[in-house]
Image (tube, helix red, strand yellow):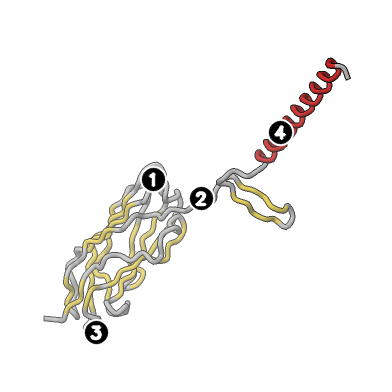
Amino acid sequence: MSERAFRGVVALVLVGALVLAIIVASAIFLARSAEPAPDASVAYSPALGPTRSLAPTPIALPVFGAPAVTAVGLIPRGGSSGRTLVLQFLESSADAIPNAPGSFRVTLTDHAGDGTTVAFVGTPSVAAPGSLGATARLVAANVLLVSIAGSDTRNVEPISISGLGVSASPTAALGSLNAALDDYTGSLATGTASNVLASPGTVIASP
């Protein structure tokens, strides 16, 4: 074989190797492009097989931050406190509450967990932005229902409830009262049903 022919063969071999390398690189690139993004979730559908969603499922935020309680102090058995109880709720973010009706309850029980021995006294008064249309009313002796008609999703909104005291029966368990939030509905449904409030007062023996 002449030197010229030999060089032609070598050139053909080099060109073939280059073409093969380009094909392999293209295959690797296409395979990686088909892989899901790191934050993609994969679900399975019996009809369609595995499907991918690039958007993570949003997590609902609680509607309120930690509530604040101004307690009534000491409550004698068989008597009642002054009407100095204040309950304050602050929206956790500007759009945490959708612009729709909703409600929740505040439930009192004595130190032993009995709700029949304690009660709210007085008439609740609500201070809140007009966009909320907030109201509060007693639906049982120891249960306060707080309701809203809507929300301003551009601003953080507060609710303050005052004008109430607490009474204790002669058989109420001595010690600090319990108060819990529950029965969240409508636009307030993402509230925490087990949200325990600070004690609104303490039952003591009658003088």
Circle 3 — which element? Answer: loop
Tell me, for residue 26, which label it has, or none: 4
Which is nearer the N-term, disc 1 or disc 2?
A: 2
Numbered label tally? 4
- What amino acid type should be assigned to the residue bearing mark 1? Ala
> Is 29 above or below relative to 184?
above
Quarter of the figure with the C terminus: bottom left
Instruction: Work out how far the residue at label 4 is from the one at label 2, CA to CA, in angstroms.
Output: 36 Å
- What amino acid type should be assigned to the residue bearing mark 3? Thr
Q: Closer to the camera: disc 1 or disc 2?
A: 2
Q: Residue at x 35, y 72 (%)?
A: 140
Q: Residue at x 62, y 45 (%)?
A: 36
- In the figure, is residue 65 to the left or right of 83? right
Which is nearer the N-term, disc 3 or disc 4?
A: 4
Q: Residue at x 80, y 23 (%)?
A: 10
Residue sitting nearer the eye, 193 or 24: 24
Circle 4 — which element? Answer: helix
Residue at image mark 2: 58
**Residue 108 place in picture, x, y as percent:** 31, 71
Circle 1 — which element? Answer: loop
Q: Closer to the camera: disc 4 or disc 2?
A: 4
Q: Closer to the camera: disc 3 or disc 4?
A: 4
Which is nearer the N-term, disc 1 or disc 3?
A: 1
- What amino acid type should be assigned to the residue bearing mark 4? Ser
Instruction: Work out how far the residue at label 1 is from the one at label 4, CA to CA, in angstroms.
Output: 49 Å
